[in-house]
Amino acid sequence: DTAVSQTPKYLVTQMGNDKSIKCEQNLGHDTMYWYKQDSKKFLKIMFSYNNKELIINETVPNRFSPKSPDKAHLNLHINSLELGDSAVYFCASSQGVRVERYFGAGTRLSVL
Amino acid sequence: GQQVMQIPQYQHVQEGEDFTTYCNSSTTLSNIQWYKQRPGGHPVFLIQLVKSGEVKKQKRLTFQFGEAKKNSSLHITATQTTDVGTYFCAAGGNAGNMLTFGGGTRLMVKP
């Protein structure tokens, strides 16, 4: 069974649309994350979330919003998509914060 | 915010040659992690270093954490084509839970 699964794997959409990416982890971890990896492979943390605290990277536009229905899920909703949002988005989880992250397979978002 | 510099950005080696990537921070780190991302794949955790001067080995991979806990290195002995990928360091600061990733070193191995 996949530990961290995210859907869809590929997402192609038009500028201005709203889209969501789903993430689920079955590891029983208490913290989940969203990362953005651009074409140059830079991995940037977007959000860190556990059942107590949401930490937002201040550079993330407020068009991006994480939604967590329960501790096993952290979805990413994006409003008014822009060309610059094209990237690979990785969900990850960990048990505690000073330990390794387990990454999902990624969602490749292309905004046309 | 915390910045982590990783060098080199790219490295081409002949199969059998050694490879090293370096990670440097301007601030003292609580820990450092290393990840490998195969082409088209996702980052996979390799190891975590916590103690000053720590050295850990995994087969042909040797990981070091500097005495001042501001730098780290990953050395691969006798590279193989299976080592191809991007290697990232990820630094944990002394406050908060954000792990800051370095820019990665992309390793290409010529058979």
Image: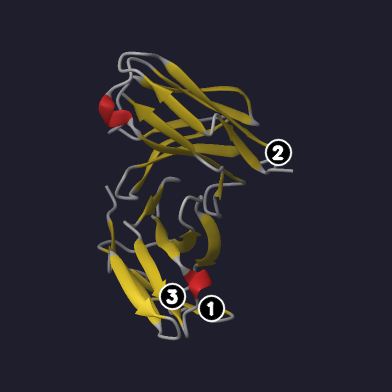
Horizontal placement of A97 versus B67: left or right?
Answer: right
Q: Quadrant of residue A83?
A: top left
Helix, strand or loop at label 2? It is loop
Q: Quadrant of the N terminus of chain A?
A: top right
Q: Residue at x 49, y 58 (%)?
A: B38
Helix, strand or loop at label 3? It is loop
Q: Is residue B91 positioned above or below A73 on the image? A: below
Label 3 crowd bin: few (<14), some (14–19), many (20+), radius 10 Å: some
Most foreground residue, B17 or B23: B17
Which mark is on residue B2?
none
Q: Is residue A57 positioned above or below A20 on the image? A: below
The residue that label 3 is drawn on is B52
Q: Position of residue B46 (x, y in %)?
A: 54, 64
Q: Chain of mark 2?
A: A
Same chain assignment for discs 2 and 1: no
Q: Position of residue A104 (x, y in %)?
A: 56, 42
